[in-house]
Image (spheres, coloured by chain):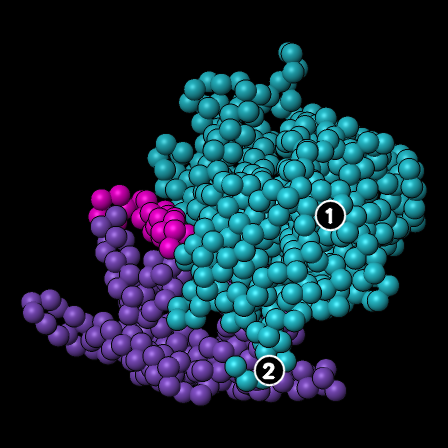
Chain colours: A purple, B cyan
């Protein structure tokens, strides 16, 4: 019965993406407006996050964080391999969603850059409201602190996984759509960006969204400065920044919990 | 010596019978000869690659499976070993053999430096941190002009013996597997030593082992460096074998592949690590041959297969494949028990009976606005059995943890034998021969009972890592085991010595904790609810045991809810309620104290 349900989910999960993929396949020779491309991409990617959760993480159930993390890395390998097969090793660049240029205080911004900043702020506020005010947000937080404890007091912990993956899917796919026109995208670009995101989150102390944004700007500045002076070491320095951040964290963080 | 044929407990410490050893040696000889006489060069190449990968994967078994720290960065550390070798050979003209200790030193130093940051992280931050520094190192290798950029360094001279060059892979192949064999022996010895016991306890949390004087941070760093050095050795082998070094084999994907090998083997098993390495190397080789036939673009698709295998293994066989393979083998590994000496470890004298052993003055612990322990005073005299009682939430366990250094007091002083010990760490408390048991049992479930108990003797023995790996610790180990066995006999669980601890009943585990505490030869024994979960006759036995211990000069402080047990056992009672001491005296005095009656039975004040 449980298995049947899994097959049904798999079929349902394959049917919708198959339709979208077919649409994309047939429409690919046609030059469409950028926003149509963006919507099609989002329709393909957002359900993927939920599918991954159901296929990989839900069956793992109560496994330890380390097992889940290794499973995540395994999933990453599969996705990256599929991306390599589908897109090939060459990069691609998308059209800008927002055109035009604005000059604010003597600094020129492209429309796309304004869009990115606006989206960041929207996500920032939305996350704040979601986790601080909404019932679902609080369910997620309670489940994160103590799954068993939350379950015992009647919190529906099983929704948290799907919700978390859907949110991350939405945010990630919008990020992808926005960045597609700003840099050349390769099959593994997403991982590089996400890992920089992790460095930024650690730099920001993993406590607040605004602090994370500030540290993202800081990382960007460092990257820009190193690519000017020692361009070949740019990536080495960016990822090495994690070490001082970890050191700082190890001095401020409280003792590791047990049990 | 007891010889029992229980099923093997911790796979890492399997001791092998003669039959198994003979077949192992035969297998090793076969593995050595077949590639040498096989007409195809591929077999030698693959067997060599397996050997090199095995070293990294064994390091990961020690680090992840036993030490509990997952690293994606072992390939990058391997790169440090390989590049050290290449640079010293090519730019400074060193002999290839001399590069081996240099590569070991370089990776050891690098992993010590990186480990200092990394091991402090907990949960998923640790593995994510390893991904970040692994990528940093990878980009550093590729970007460095000095290291030859992404093209790398080539033309490393082949090592030689006398005038005989090992240039032919067939000649170098035995060197690889000789090193693997040495590493397997050293690693198995390490697990089965005084330090190894603590390393195997790391996954179960640090509180318990710190309470018996082990320095967990130092040991975690050691484990990290050990795994790093193995990766560095593999790096040297790789540089010698391929005679060129470039950044690509030391990237993140390689790091993930090594972890996959350890997971296939079943984390925690040295032979499983070699099996995993073999499976991954062979699979990769065949996939690279096979996949391009399926689709011209599929050349790089090995990554998809490996990722899917990793996820499926975690779902279906989280214990790894090696365990299942061993169970289907025609022979069984039967565990023979190690030697136990006739005499245990030396004992230290007890302080004179009646002396002021532990004095607590004005002890206070606040958690924000909550005062868990408020201005508590009491004195414990040497040789007495003191009970600490009170209703739930009275602050008993906090008081307990304040005296053992697990919680720091916000005010007040603790004196031990007249010296101020306020705020010292659990390890320093252990150094003063104060042993404890825990309210929530803290034992390693997949280690046998004897080994868990032997952790208690950590501070009474001193053999280190090197003597452990070289088996120079056998005499001391036998005496430690004698001590642990004696402690188990005392608490009446000697027949369970070789049983996996996780299979015991909860009440028995509490008694094992007492045996572990006794192994420390303590002056003061602190017991947190030892009688919980015991049956009537077990409680009687515990009562007799504790009385005997006190008669032998040991001082005991006990937190317990079973009033009949406490009243019968103790010489002196301290009663707490809402963090305040409400009574202090003999059991008879306390029993008739109106404040105590009110606290326990309710009633007007």
Identify the image quadrant of the C terminus of chain A. bottom right
In this picture, is A144 found above or below B330? below
Q: Nearer the N terminus, badge 2 or badge 1?
A: 1
* Cα–Cα gap, marks 2 and 1: 34 Å
* In the image: residue B437, left or right of residue A203: right
Q: Can residue B547 be seen in the rendering of this structure? A: yes
* Magenta segment, prevailing SS (helix, strand or loop): helix
Q: Magenta segment range? A: A227-252
Q: Is residue A249 magenta?
A: yes
Q: Quadrant of residue B213?
A: top right
Residue at the spot 71% in from the left edge and 63% down from the top edge: B566
Residue B382 location (% of width, % of height)? 64, 45
Disc 1 secondary structure class: helix
Mark carried by residue B550: 1
Is A174 or B19 nearer to us in this picture? B19
Residue at the spot 65% in from the left edge and 71% down from the top edge: B592
Circles 2 and 1 on the same subunit = yes
In this picture, is A157 found above or below B536? below
Residue A238 location (% of width, % of height)? 34, 51
* In the image: residue B276, left or right of residue B122: right
Q: Is residue B159 magenta?
A: no
* In the image: residue B605, left or right of residue B149: right
Give the chain letter at badge 1. B
Q: Residues within 10 Å of mark 1 (few under 14, many from 20)?
A: some
Disc 2 secondary structure class: loop
In the current view of this chain or complex, which residue is farthest to the left?
A106
Residue B97 location (% of width, % of height)? 58, 21
Residue bearing mark 2: B602
Is B265 or A77 nearer to us in this picture? B265
Q: Can residue B278 be seen in the rendering of this structure? A: no
Residue A239 location (% of width, % of height)? 38, 51
């Amino acid at each position: 019965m449980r298995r049947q349900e899994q097959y049904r989910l798999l079929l349902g999960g394959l049917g919708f993406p198959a339709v979208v993929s077919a649409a994309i396949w047939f429409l690919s020779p046609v030059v469409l407006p950028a926003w149509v491309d963006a919507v099609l991409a989002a329709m393909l990617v957002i359900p993927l996050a939920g599918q991954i959760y159901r296929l990989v993480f839900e069956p793992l159930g109560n496994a330890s964080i380390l097992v889940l993390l290794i499973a995540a890395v395994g999933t990453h390998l599969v996705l990256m391999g599929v991306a390599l097969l589908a897109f090939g090793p060459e990069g691609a660049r998308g059209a800008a969603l927002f055109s035009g240029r604005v000059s604010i205080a003597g600094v020129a911004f492209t429309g796309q850059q304004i869009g990115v900043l606006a989206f960041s702020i929207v996500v920032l506020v939305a996350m704040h409201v979601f986790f601080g005010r909404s019932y679902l947000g609080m369910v997620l937080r309670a489940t994160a602190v103590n799954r068993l404890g939350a379950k015992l007091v009647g919190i529906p912990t099983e929704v948290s996984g799907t919700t978390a993956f859907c949110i991350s899917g939405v945010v990630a796919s919008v990020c992808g759509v926005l960045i597609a026109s700003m840099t050349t995208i390769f099959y593994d670009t997403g991982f590089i960006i996400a890992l920089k995101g992790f460095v930024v989150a650690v730099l920001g102390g993993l406590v607040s969204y605004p602090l994370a944004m500030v540290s993202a700007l800081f990382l960007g500045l460092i990257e820009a400065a190193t690519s000017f002076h020692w361009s070949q070491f740019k990536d080495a320095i960016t990822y090495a920044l994690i070490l001082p951040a970890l050191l700082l964290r190890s001095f401020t963080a409280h003792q590791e919990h047990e049990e | 010596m007891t010889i029992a044929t229980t099923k093997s407990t911790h796979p890492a410490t399997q001791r092998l019978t003669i039959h198994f050893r003979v077949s192992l040696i035969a297998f090793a000889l076969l593995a050595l000869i077949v590639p040498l006489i096989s007409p195809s060069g591929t077999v030698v190449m693959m067997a060599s690659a397996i050997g090199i990968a095995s070293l990294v994967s064994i390091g990961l078994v020690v680090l992840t499976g036993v030490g509990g720290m997952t690293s994606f960065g072992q390939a990058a550390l391997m790169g440090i070993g390989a590049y050290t070798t290449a640079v010293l050979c090519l730019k400074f003209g060193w002999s290839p053999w001399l590069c081996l200790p240099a590569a070991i030193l370089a990776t050891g130093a690098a992993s010590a430096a990186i480990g200092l940051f990394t091991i402090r992280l907990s949960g998923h931050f640790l593995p994510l941190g390893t991904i970040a520094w692994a990528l940093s190192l990878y980009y550093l290798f590729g970007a460095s002009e000095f290291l030859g950029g992404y093209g790398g360094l080539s033309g490393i001279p082949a090592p030689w013996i006398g005038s005989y060059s090992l240039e032919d892979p067939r000649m170098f192949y035995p060197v690889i597997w000789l090193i693997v064999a040495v590493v397997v022996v050293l690693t198995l010895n390490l697990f089965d030593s005084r330090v190894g016991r603590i390393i195997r306890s790391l996954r179960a949390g640090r509180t318990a082992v710190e309470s018996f004087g082990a320095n967990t941070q130092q040991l975690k760093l050691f484990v990290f460096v050990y795994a790093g050095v193995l990766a560095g050795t593999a790096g040297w082998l790789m540089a010698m074998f391929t005679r060129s070094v470039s950044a690509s084999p030391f990237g993140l994907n390689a790091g993930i592949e090594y972890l996959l090998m350890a997971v296939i083997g079943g984390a925690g098993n040295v032979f499983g690590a070699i099996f995993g390495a073999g499976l991954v190397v062979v699979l990769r080789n065949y996939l690279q041959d096979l996949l391009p036939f399926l689709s011209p673009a599929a050349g790089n698709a090995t990554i998809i297969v490996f990722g899917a295998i990793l996820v499926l293994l975690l779902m279906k066989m989280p214990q790894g494949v090696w365990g299942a393979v061993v169970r289907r083998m025609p022979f069984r590994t039967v565990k023979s028990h190690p030697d136990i000496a006739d005499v245990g470890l030396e004992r230290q004298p007890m302080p004179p009976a009646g002396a002021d052993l532990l004095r607590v003055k004005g002890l206070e612990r606040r958690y924000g606005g909550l005062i868990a322990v408020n201005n508590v005073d009491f004195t414990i005299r040497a040789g007495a059995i003191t009970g600490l009682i009170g209703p739930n939430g009275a602050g008993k366990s906090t008081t307990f943890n304040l005296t053992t250094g697990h919680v720091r007091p916000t005010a007040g002083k603790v004196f031990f034998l007249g010296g101020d010990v306020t705020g010292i760490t659990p390890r320093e408390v252990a150094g003063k021969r104060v042993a404890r048991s825990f309210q929530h049992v803290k034992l390693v479930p997949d280690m046998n009972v004897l080994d868990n108990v032997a952790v208690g003797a950590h501070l009474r023995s001193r053999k280190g890592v090197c003597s452990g790996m070289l088996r120079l610790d056998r005499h001391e180990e036998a005496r430690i085991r004698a001590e642990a066995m004696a402690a188990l006999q005392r608490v009446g669980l000697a027949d369970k010595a070789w049983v996996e601890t996780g299979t015991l009943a909860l009440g028995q585990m509490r008694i094992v904790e007492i045996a572990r505490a006794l192994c420390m030869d303590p002056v003061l024994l602190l017991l947190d609810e030892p009688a919980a979960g015991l049956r009537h006759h077990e409680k009687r036995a515990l009562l007799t045991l504790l009385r005997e211990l006190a008669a032998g000069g040991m001082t005991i402080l006990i937190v317990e809810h079973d009033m009949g047990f406490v009243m019968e056992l103790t010489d002196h009672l301290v009663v707490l309620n809402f963090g305040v001491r409400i009574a202090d005296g003999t059991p008879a005095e306390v029993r008739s104290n109106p404040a105590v009656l009110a606290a326990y039975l309710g009633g007007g004040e």
